[in-house]
Amino acid sequence: MEVSPVYMQSDDSEQDRPAYPRLFPTGETRKSDHLKAGLCVDFPVSVVLPAGGTGERTGLQTPKQFCPCLGRPLISYTVESFERVSWIQTIVVVVAKENIGLMMDIIQRFQHKKVLVVPGGSTRHRSICNGVAALGEQRRPAAHKPKVVIIHDAVRPFVDEDFLHKIAMAAKEQGAAGAIRPLVSTVIATTSEGYLDHSLERAKYRASEMPQGFTYDVICEAYKKCTESDFEFGTECLHLALQYCGTNAKLIDGPPTLWKVTYKRDLAAAESIIKETLSQSACLITGGLEAAVALANVLQKVFGALNMELNVTPDLMGGNARHLLEDWNFIKVSVDPFCPSEVEAIIVALEAGNRALLNPAVIIWMHLSVTEEPSTSRRATESAALIDLASTARPRNILLYGIRLHQPEDSEQWDRSASRVADIASALIRDRNPAFVGQLLQA
């Protein structure tokens, strides 16, 4: 089958519902996790992501794979899930011809790597066949025919390396492998008149899920031999491998994170998962000031009770700069007087590291007043400075918020104030609400 791929690649080879997968690892943690888990893959593996669907069931005009989650198309998260796996060689994204330009723009905008864009066919099997065929094109630069091809839905963004490794290894050994999940409902058959005919014993059956893996030769042979009826009406790749190649797939129990975005409500669930994953920890910068350190000690306890980890550091210099790569949320405590350059430095550092390219980063400027309450004019000056910084940071996908806190002399009142600050800060981090960007909240 003749296809016309559009090739984009970087020389850099690195880079139950709802369920919360492990997302967004940094380069350093990715390498260490890879070594600790012993996920060694010594054969070439590539991925085909069929993304040509129209998304009719979502009820939206935009196909669901291109719908935004936190300002980023859903398919970008799926691509990232595979892109961060070092042993995956090429990611083929198969889209409708009219969406090739849109997909190319997504690749460039979010700096995705190892991606090959291929025009899809009129059906799911035709699209997957186009993607597999593109992997065999010898005209591609640096082309290496894969040993294993993993097929995955573009609208299943939450797949991790551990499970991909299981699929790849089983596919190499058995020729084919696929994810399965328990059925959550009983399957029944109806008569032509609309009455119950019979039901299936649920314990004997499983739901076929993605990802699925095949040796390249098996999936190619299956598509060469399948019929026009298969191309037109079929959906199950594992069945093609069995019917035309005699390859009986190894079935592997998949995690609940493999769920598929199908309806409009699923987009909201996906965004909620992404927010929750981004909000599991924060980094508080004290500047080494005694009052800020005291506040950090109180906040650590309160954040812990809210199931959020709070890392405390005096600055982001030297070895402490690792927090710029590991955290998505930053709290800068300023003790009188307020210095906007302290917050600006964090914005500059995040931008320099391209940290907020894929996911919105949060900075909370926390102004701690240890003397008298600030005057009205001083409040106005601080608010204006915060608004200016926030307007600069927002186009860079950095959300800047402000909290003002006065330290009372009474220790019990101080504990209550600190607890209130933690509640506000954690809510800002979890919600990532653009409506509060640039606002200076009073705790």
Image: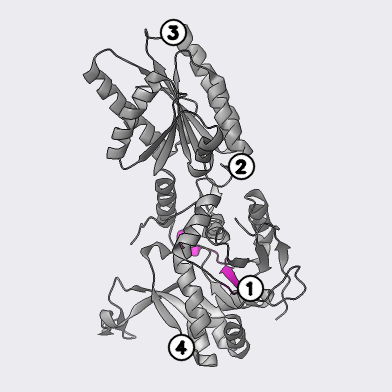
**Label whose residue precedes the other's in the sequence (4 or 3):** 4
CB contact under 8 Å: marks 1 and 2:
no
Looking at the rendered structure, the secondary structure element under dot 3 is helix
Q: Nearer the viewer, mark 3 or mark 2?
A: 2
Looking at the rendered structure, the secondary structure element under dot 1 is helix
Quadrant containing the N terminus is: bottom right
Name the disc covering residue 376, or none: 3
Q: Give the residue number, with chain letter if any, for mark 2.
A: 354
Q: Nearer the viewer, mark 1 or mark 4?
A: 4
Q: Measure the alpha-carbon separation of dots 3 and 1.
A: 63 Å
Inspect the image, locate mark 3, and give the three-letter code of the amino acid beneath it.
Answer: Thr
Looking at the rendered structure, the secondary structure element under dot 4 is loop
Q: Measure the alpha-carbon separation of dots 3 and 2.
A: 37 Å
The picture places residue 146, in percent across and down from the top left corner, at 63, 76
**Would you say residue 418 is visible in this rendering?**
yes
- Asked whether, in this view, residue 224 is left or right of residue 323, the answer is right
Residue at (27% x, 20% y) in the render:
414
**Label whose residue precedes the other's in the sequence (1 or 4):** 1
Inspect the image, locate mark 4, and give the three-letter code of the amino acid beneath it.
Answer: Asn
Q: Give the residue number, with chain letter if any, for mark 1.
A: 131
Inspect the image, locate mark 1, and give the three-letter code of the amino acid beneath it.
Answer: Gly
Q: Measure the alpha-carbon separation of dots 4 and 3.
A: 75 Å
Q: Is residue 174 above or below residue 132?
A: below
**Label whose residue precedes the other's in the sequence (3 or 2):** 2
51 falls in the magenta region? yes
- Asked whether, in this view, residue 269 is left or right of residue 132, the answer is left
Q: Give the residue number, with chain letter if any, for mark 4.
A: 248
**Would you say residue 387 is visible in this rendering?**
no
Q: Is residue 10 above or below residue 442?
A: below
